Image (cartoon, helix red, strand yellow):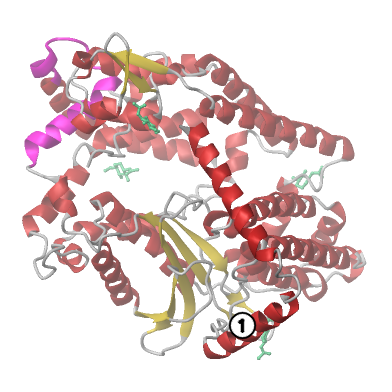
Amino acid sequence: MAKEKEKEKEKEKEKRGINLLALTGGAALVAVAVNLAISAINAKKSKNHKKKDLPGSSVRIKLSASEIHKLTDHIIAKSKEIYDLVASVPIEKATYLNVIAPLVELEAYQFPLVQSCLYPKMVSTCDDVRKASAYAEKELDSHFLACRKREDVYRVIKAFVERGEKSDLESKHFVRCLVKDFERNGANLTLSKKEELERLTSQIDELTFQYINNLNGDNSFLLFHESELDGMPREFIKSLEDIEGRKLKIALKSYNVSAVLEHCKIGATRKLVATSYGKRRGKENLDILEKLVQLRHKVARLLGYPNYADFALESRMARTSAKVFEFLEDISDNLTDLATRELNILKDLKRKEEGDSQFGMEDIAYYMRRAEEQQFDLDLGEVKQYFPFDLVLTGIFRILQDLFGLRFEETKDVEAWHESVRLFSVRDISSSELLGYFYLDLFSREGKYTHTCVLALQNGCLSPNGTRQIPIALVISQCPKQIDGSPTLLRFTEVVTLLHEFTHVVHHICNRASFSRFSGLRLEADFCEIPGRLLENWCYESFSLKMMSGFHQDITKSIATELCRSLKRRRDMFSGIKLKQEVLLCLIDQIIHSSENVDIVELLKHLHPKIMLGIPFVRWNQPSLMLPSIRYWL
Ligand SMILES: *[C@@H]1O[C@H](CO)[C@@H](O)[C@H](O)[C@H]1NC(C)=O
Ligand SMILES: *[C@@H]1O[C@H](CO)[C@@H](O)[C@H](O)[C@H]1NC(C)=O
Ligand SMILES: *[C@@H]1O[C@H](CO)[C@@H](O)[C@H](O)[C@H]1NC(C)=O
Ligand SMILES: *[C@@H]1O[C@H](CO)[C@@H](O)[C@H](O)[C@H]1NC(C)=O
């Protein structure tokens, strides 16, 4: 198949080549004139249809590959210049104005430029540009890392700190973060320790790469008789390759494995699929993981931390590993009663369907789905009919505007990288002050990033002259573009995701930080998702859900209150067991990163039944897979 496509492409190229030749043969003489004509047309066009520049935006739109290279070079040169300048300040003369302020301004200045080089990787329609952007990312990453290791700059900053110049809270916090950044990268280590750190981090990079590569390169599969797949949706069975001898082939990719775990009636099949999935490169990757844990521990010790967990948590809200343990144990205990009741429901169901066999992790997703089926008459295909894309989007806008006192207005005729991209300004509804902008790039197309996410393109912050640089965000999604005029309908989970992403936009745009470093999305990693998780609740209240829905053939017909209630009850069902599984994963992560050397299998044997209410650990059962949070066959 792939080969044939390649051939077709080649043929097309040849054809185009021929066309081109035909045009250029004989056209040489008039080339200048043609060129002139073209530039004249362009000039005229740009007079009439001049796309507006966005006031207050330093984000560069539609850069070519060579412009990206040039801009990358400029960013690197400029930051080197500022770092050199700071490094040249004599220790005894270090002040906020000559040490900290230049670094603050640099960060505000370079952020939108850096993003201008990086976001094309995700959205550009042009392969060249995406490649240039990916390359720029590598260059910039390694440059910024090198900056953060500069001992000469670190020493001057440290001298400023030691002089104890008075400053406000936010500046103090900024300086503290700055110093930490340098120290966490080893800027104050002795030379031999620096070299050791370098060795360790490159080993870590190498092993991480291997681990991921092992998984990506794995093509293992299982063969089943159709009878062994009883319960699977018909579309799924139809998608399977039929191997001679009437066996069906299932590739062990997470998508297929989750589907089997949720739908297959045959316990033995679920178990085989779950353990085989865990076994993929299991031994190799387990060894790599154990090595990685040891190396991370060494890095943490070298930098003066008791263990890697404490190193990782220092820059998060939780701060210490002890606090995390306390929280996890507390919440696990609190969940035990609820989760036990839920587990008993699942066990009863299993007894009814499969007799007295032992209940295992591979049964959780399947019996949760069965229990839901029995409890609700929820036809998710029908639910979908109520979420035409446009209506959902306007509904989300209305909810967020009302909640936060904002006004979103579309700005037309602004330059963008694709014709389907839209731009909105955000104003404070009472003062009309311009707070920021966001771009929407919502429809899927070839070469585009395949997930939903929000990027900060420019950070809100105060300029030295007291004016505010406004924040700009970009929402990327991959809704299918409607073709035949019928509206794109969203699954309920997609509605929730979309609202969630827009809460990041609002968060980014409403922020009032003085420093680009603390703007919108650059938060402690364990806080970042909290506003979104909180605001997602609007998707589960019937009055707000009605605001973002309507039957697609008659949008005045809103979703039934009973249906909204079912969606909410469905979310809360089995939340005890679901959370217990998350607690288990978190605890494993904390424990293996809190000491030097852990036998991961032994740990799981002990911890698994303890947290999961007696359900035993089966080697190669992947706890992460059992989380039935992603539903594919809606
Ligand atoms: C680097 O700085 C940190 C924090 O000030 C300190 O704990 C550590 O001992 C320093 N390391 C060296 C080698 O000076
Ligand atoms: C399994 O999942 C992959 C995507 O992850 C898909 O391409 C494939 O068709 C699926 N089905 C089977 C039977 O492997
Ligand atoms: C667990 O329950 C106790 C008692 O009700 C409560 O004080 C505590 O905050 C709960 N812990 C968590 C993490 O929810
Ligand atoms: C204030 O500074 C910013 C960034 O340095 C600049 O873009 C802006 O034009 C300045 N505004 C005024 C009024 O000087």
Which residues, given as a range, are shown in magenta? 350-376
**Residue 594, quarter of picture:** top right
Q: Is residue 501 left or right of residue 209?
A: left
Q: Where 464 falls versus 223 (above or below)?
A: below
Quarter, ligand 4? bottom right
Q: Nearer the viewer, residue 321 or 509?
A: 509
Any magenta on residue 373? yes
The residue that appears at 32% across and 76% down in the rendered structure is 401
Q: Is residue 290 magenta?
A: no
Q: Relative to residue 161, is residue 309 depicted above or below?
A: above
User: Percent from the top left, x then y, of residue 445?
Assistant: 44, 55
Label 1: few (<14), some or many (≥20) within 10 Å?
Answer: few
Q: Does residue 516 appear in the picture of this structure?
A: yes
Determine whether, in the image, residue 134 is placed left or right of residue 228: right
Relative vertical location of residue 488 with respect to residue 352 in this rendering, above or below: below
Q: Position of residue 233 (x, y in %)?
A: 19, 30
Residue tagged 1: 42
Q: Quadrant of the C terminus?
A: top left
Q: Is residue 615 visible?
A: no
Q: Is residue 560 left or right of residue 183?
A: left
User: Judging from the image, what secondary structure is the residue with disc 1 in?
Assistant: helix
Report the front residue among 303 and 67. Answer: 67
How far across and down, in percent of the image, does residue 132 sit? Answer: 68, 54
Name the residue furthest front: 26
Quadrant location of the N terminus?
top left
Identity of the amino acid at label 1?
Asn
Type of secondary structure dominating the magenta stretch: helix
Q: Could you say where residue 626 lies in the image, as x and y percent from the top left?
A: 33, 28
Residue drawn at (54%, 38%) of the image:
6
Residue in view at x 48 percent, y 50 percent: 526
